[in-house]
Each structure stands twice: as C-alpha cells, then as structure tokens.
Amino acid sequence: MAPERLNILHTAFHTAKLKRLHNNITPAPKSFASELLGLLTRNTKLERKYHGKKIKDSFLRTLPNHVHTALQKWALVTQ
C-alpha cells in the first residue's frame, strides 16, 4: 500500500473514531495499527493456506463488507 493511501486510511480511521462510529463495532477497534495488522495477518494466513490464483483473488471477499467499502472509498483500493 502506498504511503499516501495509508495516510488516507489512517485519517479515515481517526475521523470515524471521533464521530464515535467505532462504538457500533464489537469488539471495538483498539488502534489503527492493531486493526491494520489484523487485516494483513488474516490475509497472509489465508495466502499461505491456499495456493490457487482463483482462491487468492477471492481473499478480498473475506473482509467484512464495511471494511471493503471503506478501503475502496478512503484508501482508493481497487483490488
């Protein structure tokens, strides 16, 4: 992820926190770093477990819809 996109995502995370949008998530996010690490770790574990290209391409779908939408909107992630 490019530094600019990481900064956009970081800003969006803190904006959501200030607006108390994290209060509706269980368990609530502890920090931006821990949430980002969790997503990357989850993706890495799945990549190691499965080796087919079709399966790897579907890993994006393993994210909850609200996370996928946020990544597309705020970090300009397309794939």
Image (tube, rainbow, N blue to C red):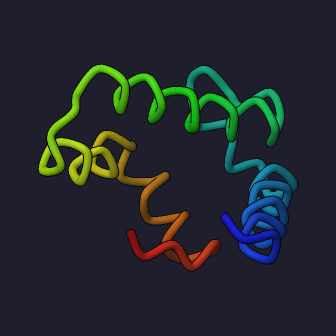
Residue 43 falls in image quadrant: top left
Q: Classify residue 46 by image quadrant.
A: top left
| Whole-percent x, y for residue 47 in the image | 35, 32
- Identified at 61% across, 29% down, the residue is 38
Q: Position of residue 27 (x, y in %)?
A: 61, 20
Q: Residue at x 58, y 37 (%)?
A: 40
Expressed as whole percent of the image width and height from the top left, the position of residue 49 reads 29, 20
* Residue 34 against residue 67 in the figure, above or below: above
The quadrant holding residue 22 is top right
Picture residue at 34% right of the left edge, 51% below the top: 60
Specify the quadrant that holds the C terminus.
Answer: bottom left
| Number of numbered discs overlaid on the protein picture | 0
Looking at the rendered image, the quarter that the N terminus falls into is: bottom right
**Image coordinates for residue 35, horizontal then vertical, percent:** 69, 35
Q: Is residue 66 left or right of residue 8?
A: left
In the rendered image of this protein, does residue 58 appear above or below residue 5? above
Q: Please give left or right for residue 32 compared with residue 48 in the image.
A: right
Residue in view at x 72 percent, y 64 percent: 9
User: Left or right: 13 with respect to 58?
Assistant: right
